[in-house]
Amino acid sequence: KGSVYMKYPYTYINQAVRMLKALVASYIVTGLLLLLTAGLLYRFELSEGKVRIMIIVTYILSCFAGGFLSGKMMKNKKFLWGVFAGFLYFGIMLLVSLAVNRQLDQTAANFVTTMVLCLLGGMLGGMCA
């Protein structure tokens, strides 16, 4: 009887560790894609519009990677874990932005668009897992 109730905290801890691994992987992907963007910007003197497109692609691919990995590790309800990975990615990004800038630089439309891109990228990654 006691062992059945004791396994639940371990399950939640395992899920949290898996999600943390997926988030770390998505931020590694973010760093690599931003390095690529910076290199391309330096080499080809890209316009602001092209840089914005690359940043949007970075959001989507990073959340896709996090959603894919979380879906692979969780094994059930993969798309929901992918959405959750995208949500956490966006939330951490928002908190870091607030800590650095002390304000939100984006308009409400950009804020919502970025959140939706992160959620959908994570969900698609989870569905493909």
Image: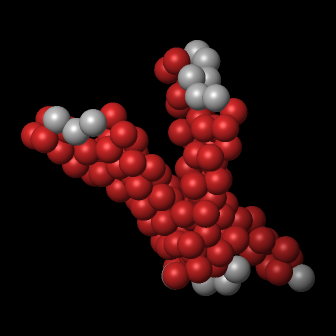
Q: Is residue 102 above or below residue 6?
A: above
**Of 31 and 17, which appears nearest the observer?**
31
Where's residue 11, x and y in %? Answer: 69, 71
Q: Is residue 22 left or right of residue 82?
A: left
Where's residue 22, x and y in %? Answer: 49, 62
Residue at the spot 58% in from the left edge and 46% down from the top edge: 114
Quarter of the image for residue 93 reads: top right
**Of 1 and 74, which appears nearest the observer?**
74
Q: In the current view of this chain or complex, which residue is farthest to the left? A: 43
Q: Which quarter of the figure is the N terminus placed in?
A: bottom right
Q: Is residue 29 above or below residue 9?
A: above
Where's residue 32, x and y in %? Answer: 28, 51
Q: Is residue 12 left or right of residue 82?
A: right
**Of 11 and 56, which appears nearest the observer?**
56
Residue at the spot 18% in from the left edge and 44% down from the top edge: 40
Residue at the spot 27% in from the left edge and 36% down from the top edge: 47
Where's residue 112, x and y in %? Answer: 67, 43
**Of 81 and 41, which appears nearest the observer?**
41
Q: In the current view of this chain or complex, which residue is farthest to the right? A: 1
Residue 26 in view of the camera: no
Q: Is residue 50 left or right of residue 56?
A: left
Residue 123 in view of the camera: yes
Residue at the spot 52% in from the left edge and 82% down from the top edge: 128
Q: In the current view of this chain or complex, which residue is farthest to the top? A: 102
